[in-house]
Image: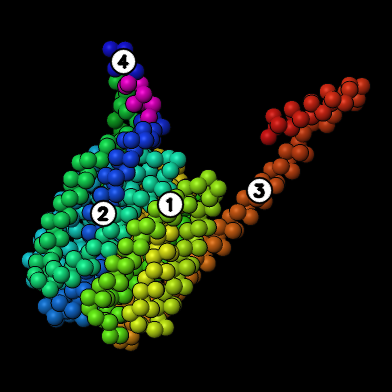
Amino acid sequence: MTHGSQDEGKTASLLNRGEARAPSLISAGLGLSLLEWTNLSESQVSLGPGLACPLGNTDLQHDFQASNSATSWFPSILMAVLHAGGPLCSILVRRFGCRTAVMLGGLLASLGMVASSFSRTLSQLYITAGFITGLGMCFSFQASITVLGYYFTRWRALANALASMGVSVGIMLWPLLSHYLLEELGWRGTFLIFGGVFLHCCVCGALLRPMATAVAPEARGGPPPPPKTSAPGCLPACGQAIQHHLAFDILRRNASYRVVTLGVMWMMVGFVMPHVFLVPYARQHGVEERQAALLISIIGFSNIFLRPLAGLVAGQRKCASHRKHLFNLAVLLNGLTNLVCTLLADFWLLVGYCLVYSVSMSGIGALVFQVLMDTVPMDQFSRALGLFATLESISLLLSPPIAGFLLDATNDFSYIFYMSSFFLITAAIFMGGSFCALWRKRQGRQAKLEGATTEAAPEQDPSQESMDGSSKRLYTEIMYVTTV
């Protein structure tokens, strides 16, 4: 009985802090490997269909008799719902835990993709492969990111990078697999296979170690609950729920979180364009279809090695205070790299572009969630991630249709890469300037505080002049340190 009560006390203390201790090194490594495989399955929805859609975009246009901008709404809705479902995922995580959220997400993603293979109109494809699959993937992806923050504290940056290697493996494998399946089975059979593979998210979610993510346990022998008050109306209740699960209060008070959220929101408009349009851009300039699909695989293969390296560098103590600047530098490099792609569309030049692009992409992928974790406390991270992903979904919803409209108007893919560079470079300039302004403002406050502390220090009493010098110096030092 004593041992059980001690365990319950430890669990209660963990829940009251809102954060669980990192497990031992062996169990942490096991959890990390499981999270990596979970992210691999998640990449099959978040990046797999988005990368397979350009390969089968011609099939969709021919089957539905639709334009480029109309078929671009399918990956746009998928990516938007993947991020916009953050508040719902936050509710699931708080109520049922990360394991249940990941398993439910895998089931929904599989159901949506299987149903999409029977779609007869683009509207049905938007609902099944776009909304249902995106919502399921949102539950799996964001829940795994949240539990990763509870698994690790010291090496959180490296853990994020290693777990995101699953995304890199998905980028490498899915274009080649999608190209083969589209040739053999068509887009309907390909989506049916996608739905079967997405069930692996349920397996990965079942293997995750449950962590204490609840706010606080219920008191067992406490005083009776207060009398129930009248329930608020529908609109006030909705407003309270939105305020509770969306971190608008953090967005309003936390300047660093505000800069990261708005900067990434602007950045994502241009960040997804090369993933969607690199393959058709290469095919338009005479590159064979198999070689064009290989370009995306080169990016994924390079990220397998570059993302852990980026996470290892960012996890060093010397780089802890400079992670946001490293992230900003990666965004700037990503935008400048897209300008090189417009110079010449030769296959080997595009291979070099993919290698350089992988460096910046690995930095963004390894640091984006770590930078977000550095700006907010972990007990508020699920709420902050929900609002962050919801605002990001607006950019992901608008980006592919805007690019498709621009392509229909100009019939030139170069303008898409110019637009991508514009959004990325301006986002890097905004975040870099804002971080510098916040740093100067913080330094000014510290200088004013030190000045006020010095002025508020009590003057030396004349009666103390007879004391010896060593005693006077000791007295002054003690008063200064105590004040600070």
Residue 3, numbered label? 4
Q: Earlier in the sequence, mark 4 or mark 3?
A: 4
Marks 4 & 2, CB-CB < 8 Å contact: no
Between circles 4 and 3, the one closer to the viewer is 4
Secondary structure, mark 3, is helix
Q: Position of residue 16 (x, y in %)?
A: 39, 30
- Crowding at mark 3 (Cα within 10 Å: few <14, some 14-19, many 20+): few
Q: Nearer the viewer, residue 71 or 224?
A: 71
- Is 393 within the magenta? no
Image point (28%, 12%), residue name: 1
Q: Which contiguous range is marked in magenta?
A: 7-14
Image point (35%, 26%), residue name: 12
Q: Which residue is mark 2?
A: 40
Q: Amino acid at mark 2?
A: Leu
Q: Earlier in the sequence, mark 1 or mark 2?
A: 2
Q: Amino acid at mark 3?
A: Arg
Q: Nearer the viewer, residue 158 or 120?
A: 158
Residue 311, numbered label? 1
Q: Earlier in the sequence, mark 3 or mark 1?
A: 1
- Is 11 within the magenta? yes
Secondary structure, mark 1, is helix
Give residue 78's quadrant in the image.
bottom left
Q: For the view shown, which residue lies furthest in the bottom direction?
A: 410
